[in-house]
Amino acid sequence: MLYLLDTANVEEIKRAFDLYPMSGVTTNPTIISKEKRSFLEILKEIRAAIGEDKMLHVQSISTKVEEIVKEAEYLKETIGGNFYIKIPVIPEGIKAMKILKAKGMNITATAIFTADQALMAARAGADFVAPYVNRIDNISGNGVGVVEEIVHLFDIYAIDSKVLAASFKNVQQVHDVSLAGAQSITVGSEIMDGLLSHPLTEWSVDQFTKDWSGVYGEGKVAYNSK
Ligand code: E4P
């Protein structure tokens, strides 16, 4: 499982990358616009915070092939490092994927609501496909079911593209897509924390500290106790 953070908030990114085994960051136009400042400044700060090797997935705004291609090349050149252009699975987007793949660009197909969209994007050259789990659930669909279908189709057709499951509302959805075989997920920092948090873990750690301190003293740890 690869963990990516779905945010453009640099402080949240620094914290998560410091604590957790993160593989990258994803953004979209909505996420970036929430920061209300220069998007290039934000993206450069994210790159500086995560280093050159971690993945940074940035979405194109354009909906026309030539513009998507130009945007992708500009962003890759300007931001640098391990860069992925996110392209929505509209017809012009699929054409742009074919062109950009031929130029060696890393591609993430996004705004995916059906397994057929994912399959076509993968055939057009997408390295990752991003099904929107919670948005599918919200239209009375089955987000995890769509992820299962994509994993199954990629298996049948021996396709190398990976599922980057996205749009989560809770930890259970993440758990379910992991069991369905999604290779990667992108989540906000609250869900990232939630994947680890358990009241009994916290209770157990408190209990260990209390028992230890009762005998060896407050603040004592292995290297300064006898
Ligand atoms: C990531 O690639 C998607 O843009 C994102 O996860 C969408 O999430 P939302 O449905 O919570 O906005």
Image (cartoon, rainbow, N blue to C red):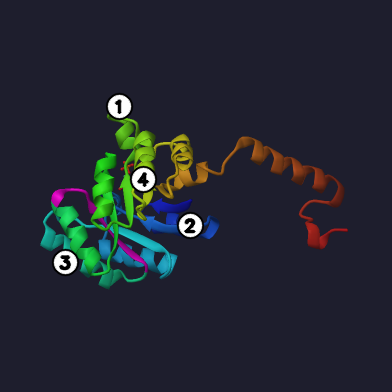
Answer few, some or many: residues within 10 Å of disc 3's Cα (few below 14, many 20 plus, some between 14 and 19).
Answer: some
Q: Kindly tell me whether residue 114 is visible in this rendering.
A: yes
At mark 3, the secondary structure is helix
Task: State the CA–CA distance, disc 1 to disc 2.
Answer: 31 Å
Task: State the CA–CA distance, disc 3 to disc 2.
Answer: 29 Å
Residues drawn in magenta: 82-91
Answer few, some or many: residues within 10 Å of disc 4's Cα (few below 14, many 20 plus, some between 14 and 19).
Answer: few
Task: State the CA–CA distance, disc 3 to disc 1.
Answer: 37 Å
- Disc 4 residue type? Ile
Residue 14 - label: none
Question: Which quadrant of the picture is home to ligand 1?
Answer: top left
Residue 22 - label: 2
Instruction: Report the residue marked by disc 1.
Output: 140
Residue 70 - label: 3
Reply above or below: 78 against 143: below
Instruction: Report the residue marked by disc 4.
Output: 156
- Disc 3 residue type? Lys
- Disc 2 residue type? Met
* Residue 101 on the magenta segment: no
